[in-house]
Image (cartoon, rainbow, N blue to C red):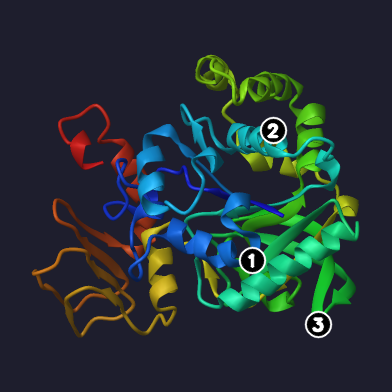
Amino acid sequence: MKIVIFAGGSGRRLWPISRQHSPKQFESIIGSQSTVQLAVDRVIAHYGAENIFISTNARYYPIIREQLPQLPGTNLIAEPVRRDLAPAVGLAMAHLAHSLPAGALEEDEPVAILWGDNYMSDVPVFQRVLATAEQLLRERKAEILFIGETPRFANNNLGWIGLGPKQGELEGAPYFAFESWTYRPALAVCQQMFASGRYVWNTGYFVTTIGFVRSLYREHRPGMSQKLAQIQAAIGQPHYEQILNELYPTLESVSFDDAILTHVSPAQALVLHGKMGWSDPGTLYALKEAINPDTNSNAEHGLVLAHQSRDCLLYNYEEGKLLAVIGLEGMVVVNTEDAILVVHKDQVPLVRQMVDSLEGTELEKYS
């Protein structure tokens, strides 16, 4: 099975840990490895370096080469400009289709779509779920299999997948009919979903075939599909960069969910989930949950002294400096070498807006 790990996001919601020149997926936020290195480590032993592809923005190509030297250079797929995920996934599928040996059918080639900015505390569970999804796909149980995380609490900052009836079990792993998507529901709705036991967190991971994904592009984004086919025809040729730079910026900037996944019918999909310990530190307060989910406690990183404080993220990214707080509750305090952020957890969604406001100003160098 081919693996595509997407690592091209800007990570502005995790500022000031994540910056334009080095977004969160390339930072060692928890532990000694970056999240993209951890993502590769979770799959390389079973699937092999030759089957792992990285999709990223061209400006991050040197970082990828430095952090992932074990991957072939031809497996790094660089977007010349950022055009959201529908073009990025389409470009990745073009490269995978090009890489197939002569006579291989796209419809028979499984591929897993993963993300390079997540954490996983129980890697063996994730590996078992991924292997089960591949086996179900090869048995033609579904065209696409979505992988969810068994929810730990009513998290209204994530997307949720609605489960239909149980369809079967493979080596002790149950799989379910796909029923619905719900993106960041209101807290009251989220609490009902959590209590029902019929919903799981949407990790964004799925297993399908190259052919199925490309068929959805042809049907629902024909213009984009045609341009991607032109790009694919140039892969490996001297004029590839020229064609890519001409056509890719003209692709519609649209999310993969809106352009493609919303057109997947329940009859085509199944859902697997497990207690993988998955977390998406997409915001600073989500990072707190990844470090310490106990709301009565603080999540601390680096040299920190907290007195009479609770439910805070205290993140000190600078060695040789003490971060000390007194009497705080529900606060996020982040110290880096050149920027300090202090924000209440309820205002964390405004961080990206603030970072966006730095563009075109004398403070842009801090973004």
Q: Relative to residue 209, is residue 103 depicted above or below?
A: above
Q: Position of residue 237 (x, y in %)?
A: 59, 20
Find out whether the residues at labels 3 and 2 contact each other: C-beta distance under 8 Å. no
Viewer-nearest residue: 354 or 100:
100
Separation of residues labelled 3 and 2 (CA atoms): 36 Å
Label 1 – label 3 distance at C-alpha: 20 Å
Please, what secondary structure does the residue beneath circle 1 have?
helix
Q: How many marks?
A: 3
Say which residue label 3 marks.
Answer: 172
Q: Nearer the viewer, mark 3 or mark 2?
A: 2
Look at label 2 and name its amino acid. His
At label 3, the amino acid type is Gly
Q: Amino acid at mark 1?
A: His
Q: Nearer the viewer, mark 1 or mark 3?
A: 1
Q: Tell me, for residue 98, which label it has, or none.
A: 2
The quadrant in which the N terminus is found is bottom right
> Helix, strand or loop at disc 3?
loop
Q: In this view of the protein, can residue 192 be seen by the observer?
A: no
For disc 1, the marked residue is: 46
Q: Is residue 9 above or below residue 58?
A: below
Query: How many other residues sit within 10 Å of disc 1, few (<14), some (14-19) or many (≥20)?
Result: few
Q: Does 310 sit left or right of 43 as displayed?
A: left
